[in-house]
Amino acid sequence: MNRSDLPGLYIHVPFCKTKCPYCDFYSVTDTKRAVQWLSTTLMEASLYREEFPSFDSLYIGGGTPSLLGGPLLEDLLCGLRDIFRFDGGTELTMEVNPDDVTREKLALYRALGVNRISLGVQSFREDEVRFLGRRHSAKQAEEALRLIADEGFAEFGIDLIYGLPGQTLRSWRQTLRKALEHGPSHISCYQLTLEGDTPFSRMSGGGSLKLPADAIQARFSLAASETLSEAGFIHYEVSNFARGLEHLSRHNVKYWQHKPYLGLGPSAHSFRGNRRWWNARCLDEHLLKTGRGEKATGGSERLSADQMRLERLLFGFRTLWGVEMSEISGKDGQKAIDGLLTSRLVELHETRIIPTEKGYLFADGLPVMVSG
């Protein structure tokens, strides 16, 4: 098995000090339950030992993983290493909040094998940080980035959000340039969207929050592509940019390329072969089931051949790898591709159909156009 074919392991840390008003990821603010969560998550891991013996990526996300104290994080990683085998070149990513960053914590992360940091900056403007309900300041974000560089993390990414009410193209470009000043190997640019039953979604429904129109959102996206490409970054997925292919997120690429992955913790998702399953989106249920020695699965699906093909199209048109021409069937499918080529939404590279920067704007709709 090639390294790229090894599964990835995701650990969901379901704790936050506060809930951001735009975030729909599962988390609770009762951090006193972290010890119990750790114990049952390792019990859950042991149930998958035979099915997933080896990994080459480990992603600790949330929630806010950087809330975990040193002893808890050490017990988590040591426990996982006792249960599973990890390839010698494993990518070990940890999501970190800027106001949790200290030299001591960073030194501990390095000692425990963390080799990639994903920092949730979101913005370098104080007004935007406050609007997003973040618990750090723009100044803290910059100081955290300086510490990360000083502590020798060659691989670190910055998460940013665009499409905020009142945001301008000028201020967005300034944010991107500020991010580049800190020398990250990876930058993620996410469009602010209204998710589920979040405060921002309710505010929008009540008329007190209005996001920029789609045409303006598209200009923000294209501005990110232009600014980061000029700085030498590769736009390898709709929302993700890397300083080179060697700096892309190995773990996240597994999701887009139908590689196997295992998710542990409440709300975590897993995939293998043509089967996808997910854990209950509830800490209480997760603790109860895993405490009894049961898997915490909340649901599952087995994908048909047509569903697998549609997902290959959906994921492919979101990345620079595109899709194989052989995935396009029938005269209608070929006619749709001809139209996309004429509109310069895609390009043909040998046997692969690759989305252009303009095509990324319509990535979710392209599979429907060509699925025949």
Image: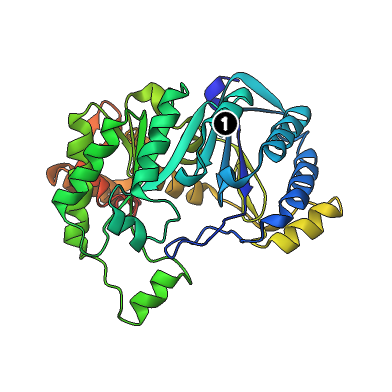
- Locate residue 328: give its quadrant: top left
Looking at the image, residue 152 lies above or below residue 71: above
| Image coloring type | rainbow
- Residue farthest bottom in this picture: 206
Left/right placement of residue 332 relative to residue 60 reads left
Q: Within 10 Å of the Cα at label 1, are there few (<14), some (14-19), or many (20+) other Cα atoms? A: few
In terms of depth relative to the viewer, which is nearer, 169 or 279? 169
Looking at the image, residue 203 lies above or below residue 331: below
For the N terminus, give its image quadrant.
top right
Which residue position is annotated with label 1?
A: 104
Tell me residue 229's x, y (percent): 21, 32
Q: Is residue 223 visible?
A: yes
- Residue farthest right in this picture: 292
In terms of depth relative to the viewer, which is nearer, 151 or 168? 151
Tell me residue 300's x, y (percent): 65, 56
**Which residue is at 74% across, 62% downward?**
285
**Which residue is at 78% across, 33% downward?**
50
The amino acid type of the residue labelled 1 equals: Glu
Tell me residue 107's x, y (percent): 57, 26
In terms of depth relative to the viewer, which is nearer, 365 or 269? 269
In terms of depth relative to the viewer, which is nearer, 122 or 99? 99
Q: Can residue 257 be seen in this view?
A: no
- Locate residue 211: give its quadrant: bottom left
Left/right placement of residue 86 relative to residue 173 reads right
